């Protein structure tokens, strides 16, 4: 049997992490974990409960009494928050615009990191996020850092929104993505950053298939 490895995929918003990570996991019959969905889920609950997003301790307490379960649906990952399906709710604008403020607190990051490490302990895994290669899985056999220009990333998210029937304003989207990237890169605790041993792939002019192929080539070298 082939060796099972850990694959960490990091990068800024809308670089194509989840789309490509999911396809790589499918090809390998690995578990796929979208860690961004976990941060979105706690941000959603905090907003609903009216928690002050500046209060890291309160957010940490809220998280300690929260169950977040990721389940593989037919063609997408289902997110259960305390048993309730919030898969669509966590993609809404209010969550997107507040998630980085929640994710910057050390109380939140410590708890999430432990959960993610536990999920990754079960064999072949593809995990995507911002700090997987640097902090959650520092020993991952393969680390990928996906990039794309901000303009292209905003265009991609815009097209995705329109396809889903969501309202979408390209200029606002670009500003939102840049603001979120800045917060994610500038936070003190496990900021968005390429791990020294990560392979950087600029996907600006690549199709999803080309990105998946590029990652699979690196996977093959490591499981051989
Ligand atoms: O899909 P999109 O790029 O819009 O974002 P996401 O992957 O769903 O992540 C949402 C937010 O969660 C990010 O902007 C980060 O603030 C936070 N996040 C994080 O801090 N660490 C991770 N490993 C994953 C996400
Ligand atoms: O997970 P992340 O936020 O990094 O990005 P994503 O949700 O996987 O991708 C954002 C959008 O870009 C999706 O609609 C993808 O289908 C699209 N995409 C693309 O057009 N070309 C790529 N090379 C990668 C993703």
Image (cartoon, grey):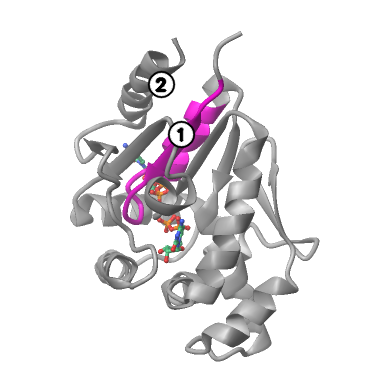
In the rendered image, the quadrant that contains the C terminus is: top left
Q: Disc 1 and disc 2: Cα gap in Å? A: 8 Å
Q: Residue furthest right?
A: 83
Asked if disc 1 and disc 2 are in contact, CB closer than 8 Å, the reply is yes
Which one is nearer the viewer's eye here, 99 or 133? 133
Q: Is residue 13 magenta?
A: yes
Mark 2 beta carbon near ligand 2 (under 8 Å): no
Where's residue 122, x and y in %?
Answer: 67, 35
Residue at image coords 40%, 54%: 131
Where's residue 181, x and y in %?
Answer: 29, 65
Secondary element under disc 2, as helix, strand or loop, is: helix
Residue 175 against residue 202 in the figure, above or below = below
Where's residue 157, x and y in %?
Answer: 36, 54
* Image-based side of 80 in relation to 136, left or right: right
Residue at image coords 27%, 49%: 194
Q: Residue furthest front?
A: 139
Which one is nearer the viewer's eye here, 82 or 133? 133
Q: Ligand 2 shows up in which quadrant of the image?
A: top left
Q: Which residue is mark 2?
A: 219
Task: Specify the segment rendered in magenta.
Answer: 4-25
Q: Earlier in the sequence, mark 1 or mark 2?
A: 1
* Image-based side of 170 in relation to 124, left or right: left
Residue 1 seen anywhere in this rendered image of the structure: yes
* Image-based side of 169 in relation to 86, left or right: left
Q: Which residue is mark 1?
A: 7
Secondary element under disc 1, as helix, strand or loop, is: strand
Residue 61 against residue 54 in the figure, above or below = above
Residue 185 against residue 224 in the figure, above or below = below
Residue 40 seen anywhere in this rendered image of the structure: no
Residue at image coords 25%, 43%: 196
């Amino acid at each position: 049997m082939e060796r099972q490895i850990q694959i960490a995929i990091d990068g800024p918003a809308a670089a194509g992490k989840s789309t490509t990570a999911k396809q790589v996991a499918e090809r390998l019959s690995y578990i796929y974990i979208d860690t961004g969905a976990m941060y979105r889920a706690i941000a959603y609950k905090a907003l609903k409960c009216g928690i002050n997003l500046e209060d890291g301790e309160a957010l940490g307490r809220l998280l300690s009494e929260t169950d977040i379960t990721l389940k593989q649906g037919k063609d997408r990952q289902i997110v259960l928050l305390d048993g309730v399906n919030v898969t669509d709710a966590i993609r809404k604008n209010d969550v997107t615009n507040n998630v980085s403020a929640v994710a910057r607190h050390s109380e939140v990051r410590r708890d999430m990191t432990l959960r993610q490490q536990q999920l990754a302990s079960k064999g072949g895994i593809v995990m995507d996020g911002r700090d997987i290669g640097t902090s959650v899985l520092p020993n991952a056999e393969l680390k990928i850092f996906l990039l794309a220009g901000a303009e292209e990333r905003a265009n991609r998210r815009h097209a995705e929104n329109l396809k889903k029937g969501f309202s979408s304003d390209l200029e606002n989207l670009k500003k939102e993505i840049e603001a979120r990237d800045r917060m994610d890169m500038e936070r003190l605790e496990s900021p968005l950053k390429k791990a020294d041993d990560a392979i950087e792939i600029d996907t600006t002019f690549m199709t999803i298939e080309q990105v998946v192929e590029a990652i699979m080539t690196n996977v093959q070298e490591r499981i051989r």
